[in-house]
Image (cartoon, rainbow, N blue to C red):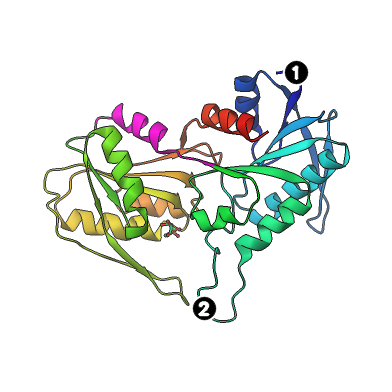
Amino acid sequence: MADISVIAGPSSPDLAAGIAGRLGADLVSTELRVFSDGESKIRLDKPAGTKCVLVQSAHPPTDTNLMQAMMIARKCADDGAKVCLVMPYLAYARQDRAFLEGEGVSAALVARLLEASGVSAIVTVDIHSQMALSYFKNARNVSSIPLLAEHAGKMKIKRPLVVSPDAGGADRAKEFARLLKADAVALKKSRDRKTGEVSIEKIDFDGSGRDTILVDDMISSGGSIIKAAEVLRKAGAGNVYAMCAHALLVGDAAQRIMASGVKDIVATNSIPGRYAKVDMSAPLADAALLAL
Ligand code: R5P
């Protein structure tokens, strides 16, 4: 596509190349320098043209990746381009409302900052809440569930039971199970709003002899998956797999999850890394094209 370019943000070069390939678009590389105080300086290797798809996920270092997205978008918009930002992992989406008195709505702030930087449309993957997207004027969310379920279908999973660690993810698990022709249940999770400590309750289901697939939008500290896997094992489940859109896997989360007995972690390439096994470039390219 001659009039569209795809800009490879420093956090997502491979995904950007995949999207450019799908669109048959020109790929613009970015050259990044980080100064000793942590400040980023970015240069595009060629002009972005009139329409561009900027690909930059906002996984850790979250604020740096977010800032770099704003810097690139501003440069492209100043040069006259219409900018569609593909930010598969949109940081701050969990702060879509004030949960405790004195808190701000940071998801709304992020939307205002990105739009002020020249982003005219945003495409995300498995956004944590629709409320977070509602702060943007032009936003689209792409579900990872069809491709994750397709991947699960190729794994040797025995009598799969699809499990959401919390009630909020029940519909996600149901959709996954529908595509896999399996059953779904949702556990009951509660989180201490001050400490972040998670507890998960068993609900009434028989997991004996069944392999289970824990499905979540993101795995960050791994706390939710580890606690949920514990509940599933007590319910007699066989192998436990963890699948998600966004494998943030902060610190030693992956090692702790595997040490807790989870057989494998499968994630999309919304965030690059060892567990990014499911390629989202095709649906993201389609969504970006519609958004532009
Ligand atoms: C929360 O509601 C999300 O859907 C995830 O379950 C959560 O953010 C995962 O975080 P962690 O891995 O730190 O438990």
In this picture, residue 65 sits left or right of residue 202: right
4 w.r.t. 134: above or below: above
In depth, the one of 246 and 74 nearer the eye is 74
- Point out the image quarter for the N terminus: top right
Residue 11, x across and y down, in percent:
66, 42
Q: Residue at x 79, y 43 (%)?
A: 72
In depth, the one of 209 and 259 nearer the eye is 209
Judge whether residue 13 can be spotted in this image.
yes
Verify whether residue 15 appears in magenta: no
Q: Quadrant of ligand 1?
A: bottom left
Q: Residue at x 27, y 37 (%)?
A: 178
Q: What is the spatial separation of the Cα atoms under label 2 and label 1, in whole angstroms? A: 49 Å
In this picture, residue 232 sits left or right of residue 26: left
In this picture, residue 212 sits left or right of residue 288: left
Judge whether residue 250 can be spotted in this image.
no
Q: Residue furthest bottom?
A: 101
Instruction: Identify the residue position indicated by label 2 in the image.
Output: 100
- Point out the image quarter for the C terminus: top right
Element type at mark 1: loop
In this picture, residue 127 sits left or right of residue 257: right
Residue 275, x across and y down, in percent:
46, 39
Residue 231, x across and y down, in percent:
23, 59
Specify the segment rendered in magenta: 141-156
269 w.r.t. 240: above or below: above
Image quadrant assignment for residue 19: top right
Crowding at dot 1, Cα within 10 Å, few <14 / some 14-19 / many 20+, comes out as few
Q: Which mark is residue 2?
A: 1
Q: Residue at x 37, y 52 (%)?
A: 257
Number of marks in the rendered image: 2
Element type at mark 2: loop
Pointer 2 or 1: first along the chain: 1
Q: Residue at x 71, y 40 (%)?
A: 10
